[in-house]
Image: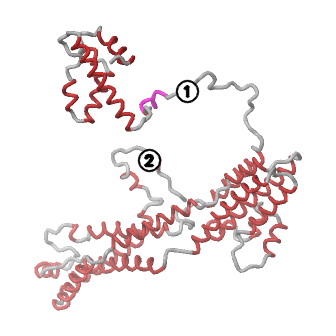
Amino acid sequence: MTITYSQEVAEVKFMGFGKLLFKWKGSVYKLFWRELITWLVIYVVIAMLNRMVLCKYTNIRGAFEDFCVEVNEFSNYVPLSFILGFFVSVLIGRWWNQYLNIPWPDRNMLFISLYLRHHVEDKGNYYRRKLVRWLNLAAILTFRDVAASVKQRFPTMEHVSSAGFMTESERETYESIETTQLKYWIPFTWYINTLNRARKQGLIASDITLDRLVNEMNAYRGNCGMLQSYDWICIPLVYTQVVCVAVYGYFALALFGRQRILGEAECSSQLESNTSMVSDSDEHFFRILPIHTLLEFFFYMGWMKVAEQLINPFGMDDEDYEVNMIIDRNLEVSFLAVDTLHDEGPADADDEDIWVGKTFAEAPYTEDALEHKKEPFLGIFEIENLYVVLLTIISKVQRRILVSGQMQTLCPWSPFLTCAPKMFRLGAVKCIFLGQNLLISCRNIRYVPEVLKKITEGDY
């Protein structure tokens, strides 16, 4: 079942992703909690043996501590981040491509509804329903081969037949075909043969229309074939084994490499108390349990479990595709399109033309949504041209006022604008010229309309 949380992260807010850490279904904790508990139990057992048994034997304890130090140094050379990062990136691409190749009948059903017609409508309905039923049948045959949930739903061809995806005669014909290969493609041969008969009977208007229907069917068949190929061709087993050995081996070594090295004084104190795993010294809890190693376990083991879940999205995990829901959806909408909604639509005899008399159609905003309204972006070169025009107008207006004998300048900030940074000049010009500051800063307001008019007419 796919876990959807898009609405919860629709806005950037404090602890936006942090709130997702408290979800259990589909979480990383659900994937590796068994491995974590197993690792902790083994680690604690080794630590107890080290404190309560090996402290009595100095030679053995020294050899054990030397082994732990050597193992810890060796674990630093394991390129775990590189191995896991590349592996997961490959799997994410494969996972998304499998979703893109799920067969959806939408294009086929719309073209069938458009192109397959007849003056005897019952005959046209019969062909349309048969064609979309075979499209859904081909998808089910494909999903039965690749998805465990669909195989549980339709374990035999009798179940497929009783669900209405094929008639008894079609099932007998299907089962009578002897081949050692997959048989998901057989409904497509029925499909093109039926299209050929429909063309000969005049249900399809032209060969061009027939070619369009066949091309859409071939694209649909290609999606089914790609899913079969993804099920057949996996990530090379050797790479998966390398990742598995690297991760499990790393944390197997960490069972020893991350053990606390006890000194002579601590060992003596432990032997004297001999009542607890923790000595009587002022020792913090994080020195007993490997807190940093537990964080590493969360990162690396969680990373590997993500890869394990992505490698086959047609399984039974929480984040796997809802294939049965896709089957139900495709069946419903395809029959709606070619049967119930065929040649149907809103009555337009007395409908009013909503946009009549309007040269530009614009949808309204509610008060809450008005803040999200943005002006269209005209391109960076249009903004640059506007900037040049505004500076030109300001300089000409200023020059016109000076020529007229007036001592007051139109805009006291004009010299500053010519030497200010370009990005700032654009904002400043917009505020000065388009705002009221231009008129407020000008005592000779009577010159402004005259100058602007002359500039517009090209006298300057």
* Residue 408, x across and y down, in percent: 19, 13
Q: Residue at x 78, y 41 (%)?
A: 343
Quarter occupied by the C terminus: top left
Quarter occupied by the N terminus: bottom right
Q: Residues within 10 Å of mark 1 (few under 14, many from 20)?
A: few
Contact, CB < 8 Å: mark 1 with mark 2? no
Judging by the rendered image, the residue that carries numbered circle 2 is 8
- Residue ranking furthest to the bottom: 59
Residue 33: quarter of image: bottom left
Front-lying residue, 286 or 300 = 300
Q: Where residue 327 is drawn, which disc sits there?
A: none
- Residue ranking furthest to the front: 459
Front-lying residue, 412 or 218 = 412
* Residue 442, x across and y down, in percent: 24, 13
State left or right for residue 162 relative to residue 365.
right
The amino acid type, in three-letter code, at marker 1 is Phe
How many labels were placed on the picture? 2
* Magenta region: 366-371
Identify the element where label 1 is drawn.
loop
Q: Residue at x 40, y 43 (%)?
A: 11
* Residue 171, x across and y down, in percent: 80, 69
Residue 214 within the magenta-colored segment of the rendering: no
The amino acid type, in three-letter code, at marker 2 is Glu
Q: Residue at x 82, y 48 (%)?
A: 117
Judging by the rendered image, the residue that carries numbered circle 1 is 360
- Residue ranking furthest to the top: 446
* Residue 150, x across and y down, in percent: 65, 66
Q: Earlier in the sequence, mark 1 or mark 2?
A: 2
